């Protein structure tokens, strides 16, 4: 089945690095847009990160073309401006004013391409902090997410680049809204998404909790749950999460596990009654589940409508039968090795985005991109010979 391409015909030029900006381009490319990624001579340094950064480039740069430009040269900068003049969307996530100094700011580009939608992914929206340098972790620490994730007194960043990725998603939302408005006005606009404000939006539920209750929200490991059973339980081998979030599920849970006496106790029939009785209920449940294997618990819960989850690890998802039923796409890495990575988590008209793809070598698409701009073969050769454009070897 072919993948949906609702953004077919939309041309995107991308000046990005790391995660937040590339996420925007990856989502747009996954929805059918033509994305040209502008890299520095030698390729984006993100390609060469080690450790936890080793997966950034392959995850968020699939489905794109690559051209390497020397933006310090007049010819390289001229190519960049031509790309922008022919684009529907520009995406960038460099430090404030970095592109402005090159004449690649929104106002300058919009003067020649008024239909351009210019998406800047920044640390902060306008305000006292807007010139600060921010990273995903900076935003998590400032915005309260790290405080809410770790135990009291031990702030802990979330286990993925959730703010980079979510900030990129908000950038896509802004771009799609601007494209819709352009249908009516004929004009583009500047869209800005940010790390800090994205974090504040995500922890807004805890801000609202304080506004409603007058009490600060406790970090998640120390929170008073809204439900009596909403925890990770140890089994004889590997742990499993179980959530009992309605009174009907409480009845079902008691029946599944033979807890007739607990169901018979009318003082804990209602959810809030059970929350107040957690100290009495939970030890009983922990003892019961602790006598079973994880497989036995899953077999008992699967198909019942009860919320549950084995505690998975990222490397285990490669073999997850549900993801492999349509949520993964084949990817050829820079090394030539084959793998598969998650597609955009959407279904549109019964179809999933994603298709086999190879990561672009630095500058691999230089000649094709320049030819698409209408450059002659001689001019392309001259740009490559002068070093303004680098062609992959």
Image (cartoon, rainbow, N blue to C red):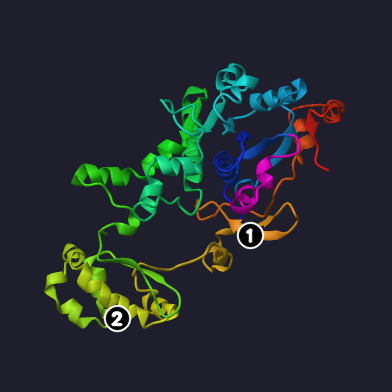
The answer to whether any part of residue 236 appears in the image is: yes
Nearer the observer, 300 or 181: 300
Label whose residue precedes the other's in the sequence (2 or 1) = 2
Q: Residue furthest front?
A: 153
The image quadrant that residue 5 belongs to is: top right
Say few, some or many: other residues with alpha carbon within 10 Å of mark 2 (under 14 / 14 to 19 / 20 or more).
Answer: some
Residue 63 placement (x, y as % from top left): 65, 46
Left or right of 80 in this view: 135: left
Residue 257 is tagged as 2
Residue 271 placement (x, y as % from top left): 20, 64
The image quadrant that residue 214 belongs to is: top left
Query: Range of the magenta residues?
Result: 41-59
Q: Helix or strand or loop: what does disc 2 sit on?
A: loop
Residue 210 placement (x, y as % from top left): 24, 44
Left or right of 237 in this view: 30: right
Decide: marks 2, 1 in contact (CB < 8 A)?
Answer: no
């Amino acid at each position: 089945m072919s993948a949906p391409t609702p953004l077919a015909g939309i041309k995107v030029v991308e000046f990005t690095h790391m995660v937040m900006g590339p996420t925007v381009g990856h989502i747009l490319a996954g929805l059918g847009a033509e994305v040209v990624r502008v890299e520095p001579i030698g390729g984006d340094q993100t390609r060469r990160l080690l450790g936890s950064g080793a997966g950034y480039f392959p995850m968020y740069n699939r489905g794109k073309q690559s051209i390497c430009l020397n933006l310090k040269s007049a010819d390289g900068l001229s190519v960049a401006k031509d790309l922008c003049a022919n684009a529907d969307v520009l995406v960038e996530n460099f430090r404030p004013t970095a592109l402005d100094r090159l004449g690649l700011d929104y106002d300058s580009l919009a003067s020649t391409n008024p239909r351009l939608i210019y998406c800047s992914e920044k640390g902060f929206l306008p305000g006292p902090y807007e010139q600060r340098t921010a990273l995903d972790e900076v935003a998590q620490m400032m915005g309260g997410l790290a405080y809410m994730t770790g135990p009291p007194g031990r702030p802990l960043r979330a286990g993925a680049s959730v703010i980079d990725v979510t900030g990129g998603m908000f950038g896509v939302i802004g771009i799609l809204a601007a494209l819709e408005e352009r249908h009516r006005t004929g004009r583009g606009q500047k869209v800005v998404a940010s790390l800090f404000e994205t974090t504040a939006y995500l922890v807004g539920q805890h801000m609202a909790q304080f506004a409603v209750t007058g009490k600060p929200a406790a970090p998640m490991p120390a929170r008073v749950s809204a439900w009596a059973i909403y925890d990770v339980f140890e089994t004889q081998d590997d742990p499993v999460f179980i959530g009992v979030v309605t009174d009907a599920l409480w009845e079902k849970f008691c029946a599944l596990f033979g807890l007739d006496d607990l169901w018979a106790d009318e003082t804990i029939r209602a959810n809030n009654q059970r929350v107040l009785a957690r100290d009495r209920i939970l030890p009983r449940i922990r003892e019961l589940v602790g006598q079973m294997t994880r497989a036995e618990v899953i077999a008992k819960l699967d198909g019942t409508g009860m919320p549950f989850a084995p505690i998975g690890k990222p490397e285990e998802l490669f073999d997850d039968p549900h993801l492999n039923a349509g949520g993964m796409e084949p990817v050829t890495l820079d090394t030539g090795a084959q793998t598969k990575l998650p597609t955009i988590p959407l279904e549109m008209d019964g179809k999933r985005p994603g298709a086999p793809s190879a990561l672009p070598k630095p500058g691999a698409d230089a000649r094709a991109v320049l030819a698409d701009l209408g450059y002659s073969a001689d001019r392309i050769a001259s740009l490559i010979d002068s070093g303004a454009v680098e062609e992959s070897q």
